[in-house]
Amino acid sequence: MSVGSVDGEVREGGAPAQQSLGTAAARNLASTTKSAPQMQEITSRWLLRALPWVDVRGGVYRVNRRLSFAVGDGRVTFVQTGGRVAVIPAELGELPALRGFDEPDVLAELAARCVQREYAAGEVIAARGTSTDRVHLLAHGRVERLGEGPYGDETVLGVLADGAYFGEDALAAADASWEWTARAATACTVLELTRADVLALAERAGALAGHLAEFAVLPPHPVNRLGEAAIDLSAGHVGEPVVPHTFVDYELSPREYELSVAQTVLKVHTRVADLYNHPMDQTEHQLRLTVEALRERQEHELVNHREFGLLANCDYGERIQPQDGAPGPDDLDELLSRRRGSKLFLAHPQAIAAFGRELNRRGLVPDTVDVDGTRITTWRGVPLYPCDKIPVTGARTSSIICMRTGESDQGVIGLRQAGLPDEVEPGLSCRFMGIDDQAISSYLVTAYYSAAVLVPDALGVLENVEIARRH
């Protein structure tokens, strides 16, 4: 065994001896350069940045609109047990002829009379020109509405998907006929309720018979093309005819949006705040990351909340289905064509990627625009902002939102109250709650927010877009 030399240049075993201070020991005397606390949850939050925010001083925002006569414009909900599908009885009230009918036993019997049918892709469910003798409730699948073009060719008028219904005229008129052809674009599960079954039940249930008779004789309301109470006008006349008298009718019970809240109590031990507060303020960084988490939750709620979220509050007449499953240029054009002055699209990043693949397949190159130093894809000049708060289902489908924004433009607006006590950001406050007997400081961090759709056509959604990569 070799030994180290006298001058210490060689250690035992032949290894060279250490000749200077090591880095591990030197770090005890050095100041470390640190980063601020990082957080992976932080996203771009384009929705919060793009929405125009309106200050709500009273905590409630009321949307006054012209009176409208919308009947049966909802969707039908189903329950599934294995391969058996049944309609929830109360959901039959979405059909125009049954709107307002609230006899649970009768609705339950009507639901029991619905017959489940399975249609293969390409199979015709109802042919144009034939008699309409039943209403179809689409539980699952996509159905194309086919019409006739000016030269007798076949045209696609639209696409229906889960929860839609068609053929509802069969319950109101005996001589109704199909004005278009319904063809299954995919395998479809449909529940069918015939007019004969409804009338047979009405013979035994007087309440149903009376309701149907009352619905049949209801006088039509004069409305415009959007279902609003008409304003009687005269134009293009000459001479001295009698000018029509009119007034603008309003909704008697306008919708009110209350500000929603997201809160948490931030706790910081006084010993940490006193002794470990340099070079970075511990309370400040704890609050900064808490605010980031609250803002992330705020954007999630603005998209998904059942009361005021964009997906839940989109009018059913403004929801469309993709023509080919994957989101293509034709689908986004359809969204744009349904509203004036569209300001932005909002889509999950995977939906944007699927849209990009469709563009590549067609050899199209979209434009981009610089927004705060970030290049954003646009379509027809409207930016397509990514938003990972839009859900992706287990079947790899998502939605694309299109909206007009601004109070002066009758669009979508964000709601908040500025000037809160102890406000740290608009609509967000941090209040000191004191120190408990364990020497822990508490801070109540609160964010108030909501969103309002001023008129139905300000918001549109392309639903059930397929985002999986195709082979």
Image (tube, rainbow, N blue to C red):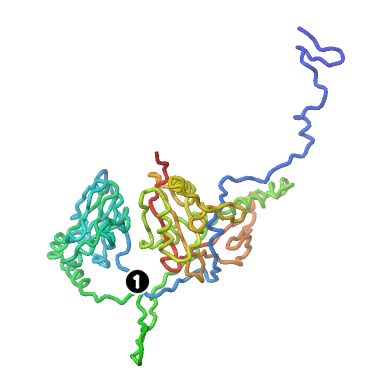
Q: Is residue 389 visible?
A: yes
Residue 360 placement (x, y as % from top left): 46, 46
Residue 355 placement (x, y as % from top left): 45, 49
Residue 127 placement (x, y as % from top left): 20, 56
Q: What residue would you read off at disc 1? A: 225
**In the shown orientation, is residue 131 left or right of residue 256?**
left
**In the shown orientation, is residue 168 left or right of residue 250?**
left
* Neighbour tally class for label 1: few under 14, some 14-19, many 20 plus, Cα within 10 Å: few
399 or 243: nearer the eye? 243
Residue 200 placement (x, y as % from top left): 13, 62
Task: Please tell me in which quadrant of the rendered image residue 400 appears.
Answer: bottom left
Q: For the point 19% across and 52% down, which residue is it?
A: 115
Q: Is residue 242 above or below residue 155?
A: below
Q: Residue furthest top?
A: 1
226 or 198: nearer the eye? 226
Q: Is residue 12 above or below residue 43?
A: above
Task: Please tell me in which quadrant of the rendered image residue 252 appears.
Answer: bottom left
Q: Is residue 301 visible?
A: no
In what element is the residue under mark 1? Answer: loop
Q: For the point 24% across and 76% down, which residue is it?
A: 219
Q: For the point 38% across and 83% down, which residue is it?
A: 247
- Quadrant placement of the N terminus: top right
Q: Residue furthest right?
A: 7
**In the shown orientation, is residue 67 left or right of residue 105?**
right
